[in-house]
Image: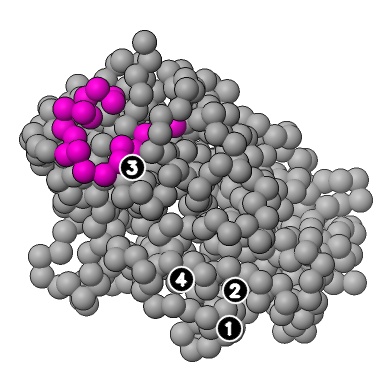
Amino acid sequence: MERKVVVAGWGQITQPKELNKGAKDPMGLMTHASLKASEIMTSKKVLENLDGIMVVRIVSRNYSSPAKQLAQNLKATPEFTHVSQIGGNSPQMLINMAAGMIARNKLESILIAGAETYVQRDSNLKTIENALFKGVPKDYEGDDLKGSTSLENAHGIKHPMQGFPLFETALWAESGLDFQTYMMKIGTMWSEFSQVAAANPHAWSRTIKSPEEIITLSKNNRPVAFPYTKYMNSFVMVDQGAAIILMSEEKAKKYSSKEGQSVYFLGGGYAEDRQRFMIEKSDFTSSSPLESAVEKALTRSCISLENIDCFDLYSCFPSAVSIAKKMIKIEDNDPRPLTLTGGLGFFGGPGNNYSLHSVATLAQKISTGERSNGLITSLGWFMHKHAACIYGSTPSNGELQNYDIIDQKESLVGDEPIKIRDQYNGRGTIETYTIIYDRNHEPSMAILYGRTPDNFRFIARTQNDQDIFNQLTKKCMVGQKVNIAFDSSQNINIADLI
């Protein structure tokens, strides 16, 4: 008989920026969050008796065996340990995997933990310009560290803060709205996220931002990559950790404090885009794998979208939320919350681990009766890898046993990657674009993605010309024609607006 799976414990910790002495590293935060998770149950011995420990890949600090080290800290001797790959989808994937193992009677109790410490507390340390993956060793062999192609890197697209604005420009074009109206719509959504964060004791930023503050350039809100300001980006440089304990329903009853409602894992889904990289995508305003992951989670949970009480949509950037709403079919006037934490821009975006905080937050709300159930989505890299999970106060009749295995074997969905012209001379049509700014608020380059007349994809930079930058920001240039010429001296394509 298949076991029901319960989120039996959950804990979160946010380490204050002002803390100068006694600050914990990621391992310390994971240990602390795990202890907090055990406090929900009747005995702390639950940690010593864990059957499995899973750790979300830490990228701010390098540990050779983080799951085993965490086990030592907790005085646990699990028979199974595992560390995820890189990607914001990782917490939900681990939960899917752990739930499957419990449902299959392989294990009875599994701890899932993750943490990051990015705050630089020693003023003598040199600031690392690209700190996101500072804890990944140079000999790391995982292909999951790669989010963009060498061709994209050469043209200036390397990291999420440069890639997700491309989705936003395409969404702006699709909306048909003028720039100010569109930005106010996005700013209003983001302001609502800041309001949720302001009420969350675990949030990194608890200051409410108005839509005008979010979209208006200022000394503290510099342009990062068009059309995004600083306040529209993830807040990555945080110190945060979270942990949850999954158990079989039978095991959980042994440790239950009998306070609050039970929290059940009802079902999950995972999918990857065949069009892995931005340059391979045929459409910048949708996501087949996101749609697939959510459909799987709903079907397996035996719950309809209409009966979902709340959402926590992965919110690294506004475009990620907008595309998720579109794929899930959540209307703009839907009263259900889109975030439970405040999102990565205000709650905090601790490396790969954000959605574990979402689960801990939702579990608390279900336990207290504030929510009856909820859907959480998560993604890795540029809308490439997607995981979704549903949790609730009432167990479903769905089966969990092998879905995690099936999803891993049959993860790819969507169309095949579109064909690319690395070096191109001729006319093309703009599909989306962004402008990258330096820290002095000055534009450093504009990057275009487009199609050739024979339907190949190209990527190009424009000339470093203020008039061109002005044209791209004042009017939506998606659909406009450009002339492309390959520059062999820079090994990039150069685009001139027609």
**Mark drawn on residue 194:** 4
The residue to which callout 3 is attached is: 56
Q: CA distance from mark 4 to mark 2?
A: 10 Å
Whether residue 188 sits left or right of residue 360 in the image: it is right
- Residue at x 47%, y 31% (from the top left corner): 267
What residue type is disc 4 on? Ser
What residue type is disc 1 on? Glu
What residue type is disc 2 on? Gly
**Contact between labelled residues 4 and 1, with CB atoms less than 8 Å apart:** no
Q: CA distance from mark 3 to mark 1?
A: 36 Å
- Residue at x 14%, y 45% (from the top left corner): 39
Tell me the SS state at disc 4: helix
Instruction: Return the disc, 4 or 2, that comes first in the chain's sequence.
Output: 2
Q: Which is closer to the viewer, label 4 or label 3?
A: 4
Coordinates of residue 480 in the picture (x, y in percent): 87, 66
The residue to which callout 1 is attached is: 212
Magenta part of the chain: 248-266
Near mark 3 (Cα within 10 A), the count class, few <14, some 14-19 or many ≥20, is: many
**Contact between labelled residues 2 and 4, with CB atoms less than 8 Å apart:** no
Coordinates of residue 16 in the picture (x, y in percent): 23, 69
**Mark drawn on residue 428:** none
Quadrant, the C terminus = bottom right
Quarter location, residue 386 = top right
Near mark 1 (Cα within 10 A), the count class, few <14, some 14-19 or many ≥20, is: few
